[in-house]
Image (spheres, rainbow, N blue to C red):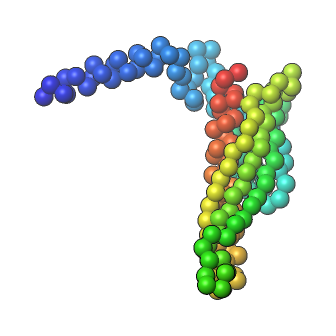
Amino acid sequence: MRLRAVLPVLALVALTTLNACGFRPLYATDSSGQSTASDMAQVDIALINDRVGQVTRNALLETLTPRGQVSNPLYDLTVTLTEATSGQGFTKDNEATISDYLVTAQYQLTRKSDSKVLRKGTVRARTSFNIVDSDFASIEAEDAARTDASKQLAQQLANQVAIGLRSQ
């Protein structure tokens, strides 16, 4: 019974401590009424090469600008992707049975008005897929792995954009 009485007090102390250290929720509205979500809608996402880049960009557009892009965005996001595949499981004949797919994105978020770089860095997404006797099934599994990795990468990029916009 004493533990139930102490929990609300501990929760109050924890919240007070977080507020004192400068903690702010990433997607909350700040004191001026500006929210990270409205800032994210102001980001112009540059075209990204290859099919994986298209899937990543489309997922980013859905996340950052769900209501459509604005006519005069305030920020630019450029992304460069690199892909790698490596065999992991091998048979006696030295043929891979499992493959890892790794996609790496180097990104830069820039404010258009003064060309100030708000955030830049690298994010990665990794998925695996089985290599089977059927070529068609293996190709489909690899395509699904690429799509999954692209969507994971887009979510990570959206988080980095939110952090960059919130910290300016």
Q: As displayed, is residue 73 above or below residue 12?
A: below
Where residue 36 appears, x then y in whole percent? 64, 28
Residue drawn 65% across and 65% down?
100
The answer to whether residue 70 is seen in the rendering is no
Q: Is residue 43 left or right of residue 25?
A: right
The image quarter containing residue 99 is bottom right
Where residue 120 appears, x then y in whole percent? 76, 34
Residue drawn 67% across and 81% down?
95
Residue drawn 54% across and 22% down?
24
Q: Nearer the viewer, residue 85 or 41?
A: 85
Q: Nearer the viewer, residue 70 or 151?
A: 151
Where residue 53 appears, x then y in whole percent? 78, 54
Q: Nearer the viewer, residue 91 or 39?
A: 91
Q: Is residue 77 left or right of residue 24?
A: right
The answer to whether residue 161 is seen in the rendering is yes
Q: State the quadrant of the N terminus.
A: top left
Count of all numbered marks drawn on residues in the image: 0
Where residue 135 appears, x then y in whole percent? 70, 83
Residue that protrudes farthest toward the left in the picture: 1
Q: State the quadrant of the C terminus.
A: top right
Residue drawn 57% across and 23% down?
29
Q: Is residue 144 left or right of residue 17?
A: right
The image quarter containing residue 140 is bottom right
